[in-house]
Image (cartoon, helix red, strand yellow):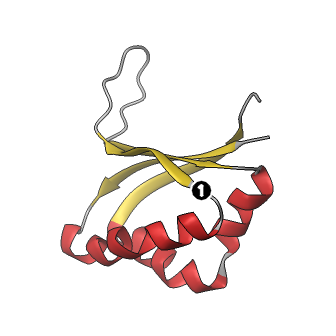
Amino acid sequence: MTAFLVLDFKVTDLRGFMPYVEAIPTFIARHGGRYRVRGAAPTVMEGDWAPDRLVILEFPSREAAQAFLADPEAQDLFAIRHATTVSKLVLVDGCD
């Protein structure tokens, strides 16, 4: 069953964030992931959720998404994202 990582984020240090942007696609692909939405500015249609930017990644399974998040070689990149953005991340299963 496919799984999706949904990242709601606001960049606080664009220059510092750029190494993450440049390098993370390799790790996403390594775990079978692909971008479905890439840094898009959303339009709120209902409610009070006000994300600044969204990324949605599709993975072939929940396990593949979790392996991406746990990849030891990607941890420095995640640290860059944590230091240069305010972000929220959720993992959800698809409806295959």
| Quarter that holds the C terminus | top right
Residue 6: image x %, image y %?
Answer: 54, 44
**Is disc 1 surrounded by few (<14), some (14 to 19) or many (20+) residues within 10 Å?**
many
Between 76 and 22, the one lying in front of the other is: 22
Residue 44: image x %, image y %?
Answer: 35, 22
In the displayed structure, does residue 21 sit left or right of residue 69? Answer: left
In the displayed structure, does residue 95 sit left or right of residue 12? Answer: right
Badge 1 element: loop
Check disc 1 and report the residue beneath it: 33
Q: Residue at x 72, y 42 (%)?
A: 2
Q: Residue at x 39, y 51 (%)?
A: 9
Between 28 and 75, the one lying in front of the other is: 28
Q: Residue at x 69, y 58 (%)?
A: 65
| Quarter that holds the N terminus | top right
Q: Residue at x 46, y 78 (%)?
A: 77
Residue 23: image x %, image y %?
Answer: 40, 76
Relative height, residue 13 to residue 80 (above, below): above
Relative height, residue 62 to residue 19 (above, below): above
In the displayed structure, does residue 56 sit left or right of residue 51? Answer: right
The amino acid beneath tag 1 is Gly
Tally of marks: 1
Relative height, residue 65 to residue 45 (above, below): below
**Residue that sits furthest to the left in the current view:** 15
Residue 74: image x %, image y %?
Answer: 55, 79
Q: Quadrant of residue 66?
A: bottom right
